Image: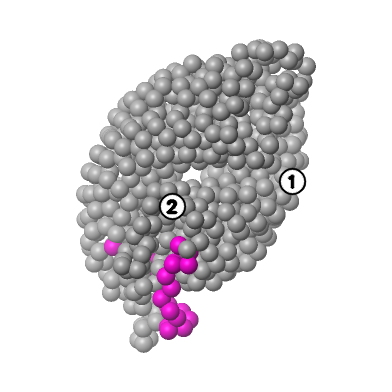
Amino acid sequence: MLVLLSLLLIAHGASSSIRCSAIPNYESTDMISLLDFKRAITKDTRRALRSWNASIPYCQWEGVMCSLRHLTRVTELNISDLGLAGTLSPSLGNLTFLKILDLSNNNFTGELPPLNRLHRLQLLLLRNNSLQGMIRDTLANCSNLELLDLSSNLLVGEIPLALANCSNLEWLDLSSNLLVGEIPRNIGFLSNLLFVYLGHNHLTGSIPDEIGLLRNLLDLFLAGNGRLSGGIPPSVLNLSSLVVLDLGNNMLEGALPSNIGDMLPNLKWLELDYNKFEGHIPASLGNIPGLRRLGLSFNNFIGQLPYLECLRASLLVARLPGARDPSSSSSSPVPKAADRRLIDLRLPLEPAVTGDSHERLDKPTDFRRAITEDPTQALRSWNASIPHCQWEGVNCSRTHPGRVTVLDIGGKGLAGTLSPSLGNLTFLKRLDLHNNNFTGELPPLNRLHRLQELWLQNNSLQGMIPDNLANWSNLEVLALSSNLLVGEIPRNIGFLSNLFLVDLGDNHLTGSIPDEIGLLRNLLDLFLDGNGRLSGGIPPSVLNLSSLVVLDLGNNMLEGALPSNIGDMLPNLKWLELDYNKFEGHIPASLGNISGLRTLGLSFNNFIGQLP
């Protein structure tokens, strides 16, 4: 049974909303409200709202859609990714027929306007702006809300108790803000929740037992709050559908449940690093057949690493003290992870050193000089009086002192360009600069052959995706969404066989989806949505990605018929979004064979026939 099913454009392309081409242009309440909203916009460098004038019926304005039944009432306002700046006018609260409000990926500031009158609202997306203040009346009348995304802003205060009013909510993303306080216990009332992202705030207290009432939950992301404490509540083991559980970078403690692997058999991603967990690592983790990511480093585990042979060899468990280094003069082989003695798990997995041992210990100082704005003084520790391995967001190797392995300064509001000196950090495994205001082109990073994670989403980076991707043979995460990238998806992406997350959505990419994408047999999530001009069909090779959980190709110009056997070949899909394209033909009956499918978006295409 599908929980979130977008309206399907089938049988003559019927839809609940349509652009108004013959609506009289008189001053309705909605038009006045839209003009008030426009007046509060102070910057529109792309002239995206040039159609918002009295000579054009407002139902034909950019981003505006009106009801087919109530001809003058606005049902959708979608002006995301347009570089708009200003404040959000309270007049938005007068658009009482609004179902979709998407202002994400702009530069709006100020407080959230009161939206408590929008009782029809289903999708509210305000992510990646600079909105401030508290979440107040926004949630007062939200019984129809299905998706709430306020992530990557500057919101403060506590998560409001009124959240419990959103009884139909399926997607909750408040991550990367400045929220404080505890996770409300009444979150357990939101039984339809599929995705919960509350990470990278300043939340405190324990994880509430009531989280275990969310039996449909697929993703639970609480990482990076720093001060969440207590243990993993036993009720979490009730979440048998869980695919992602990320609790890293907190102060959680205690032993892991011994049966965690038996009770959470669908996990693909389990991150518990940078906490205070202790005791033995449960042997039951080896019973999770689809686990692709396991992070346990920087805790206080003891004993032996259990037999995890069924898991991928590249799992980020830890490099264990006492394991022989391949660069050692001894000829003894490095023991398999399952055979290594475990003293503690506070050391991250470290690859062997290759190349010139006299290579200088590079510091990210040139990178700092290319930053022109640091509004939160996030880099105040980046000075000569402090060792660079103690700078904010910098981690260094324990086995090769001075060599930077992690540069993580995402969500700091930084502006500037990316210095080519980043390419000198040859020991770098994780580069995370997401949710900043970096501009210019991607620097040459072809020397970063140890790189495993590249998080650059939600900036204003330009140019093309580098065509030397093949140098990143260890890459597992490629996140470049919500930038201004152009050109085609490089075909040699197929060489990156370790990738399990590819997020290239919300750019300006063109051309077709390369056949080589089907070589990424470990891929779990593929986001290519919102590029607008990706064309051609779904390549048959995509059906080789049997582990795929998320496939989002929406808002492009893709066409052709869907493969008739898509549901049989992609049995692990939870999220399939194909809306706002030019697909045609019949909707495959095999979609009904995907037992775990939770979200299906097929609207605004040219499908014919009946819904199977």
The residue at the point 42 percent across, 70 percent down is 363
The secondary structure type at the circle numbered 1 is: strand
Amino acid tagged 2 = Asp
| CA distance separating discs 2 and 1 | 39 Å
Is 363 magenta? The answer is: yes
Q: Residue 374 carries which label?
A: 2
Look at the image and tell me in which quarter the C terminus lies. top right
Q: Is residue 93 above or below residue 351?
A: above
The residue at the point 55 percent across, 44 percent down is 550
Closer-to-camera residue (287/4): 4
Q: Which of marks 2 and 1 is nearer the N terminus?
A: 2
- Image position of 149 (left or right of 65): left
Q: Which residue appears farthest toward the right when viewing the image?
A: 22
Is 57 magenta? The answer is: no
The secondary structure type at the circle numbered 2 is: loop
Main secondary-structure element of the magenta-colored stretch: loop
Q: In this view, does 110 lie above or below 16?
A: below
Q: Mark 1 points at which residue?
A: 535
Point out residue 439 in the picture as x, y percentages from the top left corner: 57, 54
Amino acid tagged 1 = Ser
Which region of the structure is painted magenta? 346-368
For discs 2 and 1, the disc positioned in front in the rendered view: 2
Q: Is residue 15 above or below residue 504?
A: above
Task: Give residue 309's quadrant in the image.
Answer: bottom left
Point out residue 254 in the picture as x, y percentages from the top left corner: 21, 49
Which class describes the residues within 10 Å of circle 1: few (<14), some (14-19), or many (20+)? some
Point out residue 90 in the picture as x, y percentages from the top left corner: 50, 22
The residue at the point 71 percent across, 24 percent down is 53
